[in-house]
């Protein structure tokens, strides 16, 4: 029986194709000869001819072709990029979600900040309030709380936050009072006046606001406006002794002694048991060495034992019990500092800051130059201040006085304090000659002379 000429080739071709498709190893799979029309390529690794099949990678038993490897590398790179983007997205959402508007999250930050503030962890509380403010930048309550905390760390930032809070809620009395208080603490007075005037129109019966505003106008030397506000305060609440006392102090500082006494008497008619007003009236009499001060001072100490320390030297001054002069020295307030006009050697004036923590007085160098003294061979001493340490000449002043209080042979160092201009320090080497009472309410020092202790 004659065989079909193609029947012998058909199994061989089928066998060849199946061996190429089904075999992944073995020499016979790659060294058999395919049909003449089959597409072929050489393996770049071993040089064998490889049958190219549609939609199948070019592959032999020795490994992937360069094309297949490129495809694999590309796919791996895409996968890595996608994974990296996913990680970055998760990190952003995890760590920076506070930038998305979420009032509930703002409340959570505020609660945590309040807890940190209670535990006096100020920096942590500030950071949490800032996060809350980032979430809800238009909430004045968050920003004014942040401003309060920032006053201890970043005064300029505190002013900015308080101003923003006041602009967001211009009719909120508490927010604006806090803003004004921060303004006053840091001496930025130019911004306070319009805020005060706006609030006074909104709240014409708020006595605390009137007192705060009057104190501001008194500080900037607008005495007529301060006087008017104090008077309004006395009418808003006649039983409020602070308004009467402040008005009397304003008159006393302006040299209107009789007006001050009348205000105190009017205040006592409304507040007959006010230790503050009784003491103020006794103080006025005592400064004039009038014995009429005695019953008022004693009554004030009886009503408020806390006044005893200030009452005692005034009583001694009036009754002359000590046999030694008691001097009332006027102080001038600048922020938290008190300055006093000091006379050295009877003719050289210098502003000195009262500093009970300084062992020695400090005088500026222009005093020495004015006196023509030669201190080139003077003993040098080491001094330490808040600005750092230095060495300075030690001198002895033959005469030094403030007000009517005078001391002789006072040791001092000659030193120009950084940022203090031509000011000095009034330290213990002068104050030890006296028994000292610092009356900050009246901006005075009460000095009773005494014998200096031996060193």
Image: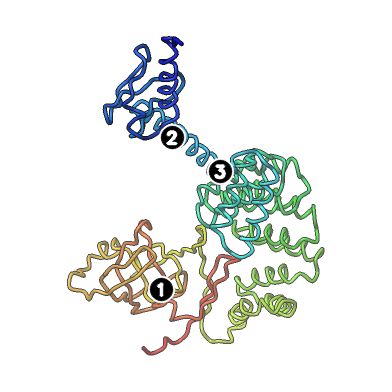
Q: Callout 3 environment at 10 Å: few (<14), some (14 to 19), or many (20+)? A: few
Q: Callout 2 environment at 10 Å: few (<14), some (14 to 19), or many (20+)? A: few
Residue 358 is marked as 1
Which tag is nearer the camera, tag 2 or tag 1?
2
- Whether the residues at callouts 3 and 2 have beta carbons within 8 Å, the answer is no
Residue at position x 51%, y 56% in the image: 153
Asked where in the image residue 161 lies, by quadrant, the reply is top right
Q: Is residue 24 above or below residue 256?
A: above
Q: Nearer the viewer, residue 192 or 53?
A: 53
| Label 1 residue SS | loop
Q: Nearer the viewer, residue 264 or 51?
A: 51
Which mark is first along the chain, 2 or 3?
2
Asked where in the image residue 167 lies, by quadrant, the reply is top right
Which tag is nearer the camera, tag 1 or tag 3?
3
Q: Whole-Å distance between the Cαs marked 1 and 3?
A: 50 Å
Q: How far from the left and from the top, in percent, is residue 210?
A: 71, 50
Q: Callout 1 environment at 10 Å: few (<14), some (14 to 19), or many (20+)? A: some
Q: Nearer the viewer, residue 112 or 434?
A: 112
Label 3 belongs to which residue?
A: 96
> What quarter of the picture does the C terminus occupy?
bottom left
Colour mode of the rendering: rainbow
Residue 344 is marked as none
Which mark is first along the chain, 1 or 2?
2
Which mark is first along the chain, 3 or 1?
3
Label 2 belongs to which residue?
A: 76
Q: On the picture, is 427 further left or further right than 192?
A: left
- Name the residue furthest bottom: 454
Q: On the picture, is 301 further left or further right than 355?
A: right
Q: Is residue 400 above or below residue 339?
A: below
| Label 3 residue SS | loop
């Amino acid at each position: 029986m004659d065989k079909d000429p193609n029947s012998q080739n058909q199994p061989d071709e089928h066998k060849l194709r199946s061996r190429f498709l089904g075999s992944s190893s073995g020499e016979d799979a790659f060294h058999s000869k395919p049909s003449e029309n089959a597409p072929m390529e050489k393996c770049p690794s071993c040089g064998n001819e490889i049958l190219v099949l549609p939609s199948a990678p070019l592959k032999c038993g020795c490994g992937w072709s360069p094309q297949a490897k490129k495809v694999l590398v590309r796919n791996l790179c895409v996968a890595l990029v996608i994974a990296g983007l996913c990680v970055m997205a998760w990190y952003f959402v995890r760590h920076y979600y506070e930038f998305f508007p979420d009032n509930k999250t703002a409340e959570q930050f505020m609660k945590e900040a309040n807890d940190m503030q209670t535990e006096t962890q100020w920096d942590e509380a500030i950071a949490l309030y800032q996060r809350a403010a980032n979430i809800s930048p238009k909430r004045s309550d968050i920003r004014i709380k942040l401003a309060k905390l920032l006053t201890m760390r970043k005064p300029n930032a505190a002013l900015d936050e308080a101003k923003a809070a006041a602009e967001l809620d211009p009719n909120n009395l508490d927010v604006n009072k806090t803003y004004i208080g921060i303004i006053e603490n840091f001496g930025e007075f130019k911004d306070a006046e319009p805020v005060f005037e706006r609030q006074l129109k909104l709240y014409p019966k708020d006595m605390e606001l009137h007192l705060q505003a009057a104190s501001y106008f008194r500080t900037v030397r607008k005495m007529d406006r301060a006087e008017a506000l104090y008077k309004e305060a006395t009418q808003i609440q006649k039983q409020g002794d602070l308004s009467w006392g402040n008005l009397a102090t304003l008159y006393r500082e302006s040299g209107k002694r009789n007006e001050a006494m009348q205000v105190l008497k009017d205040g006592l008619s409304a507040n007959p048991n006010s230790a503050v007003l009784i003491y103020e009236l006794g103080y006025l009499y005592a400064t004039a060495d009038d014995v009429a001060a005695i019953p008022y001072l004693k009554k004030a100490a009886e009503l408020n034992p806390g006044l005893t320390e200030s009452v005692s030297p005034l009583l001694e001054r009036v009754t002359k019990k000590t046999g030694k002069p008691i001097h009332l020295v006027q102080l001038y307030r600048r922020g938290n500092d008190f300055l006093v006009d000091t006379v050295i050697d009877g003719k050289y004036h210098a502003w000195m800051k009262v500093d009970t923590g300084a062992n020695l007085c400090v005088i500026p160098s222009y005093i020495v130059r004015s006196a023509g003294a030669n201190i080139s061979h003077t003993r040098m001493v080491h001094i330490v201040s808040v600005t750092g340490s230095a060495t300075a000449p030690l001198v002895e002043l033959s005469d030094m006085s403030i007000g009517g209080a005078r001391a002789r042979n006072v040791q001092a160092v000659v030193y120009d304090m950084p940022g203090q201009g031509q000011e000095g320090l009034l330290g213990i080497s002068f104050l030890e000659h006296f028994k000292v009472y610092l009356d900050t309410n009246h901006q005075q020092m009460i000095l009773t002379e005494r014998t200096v202790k031996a060193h």
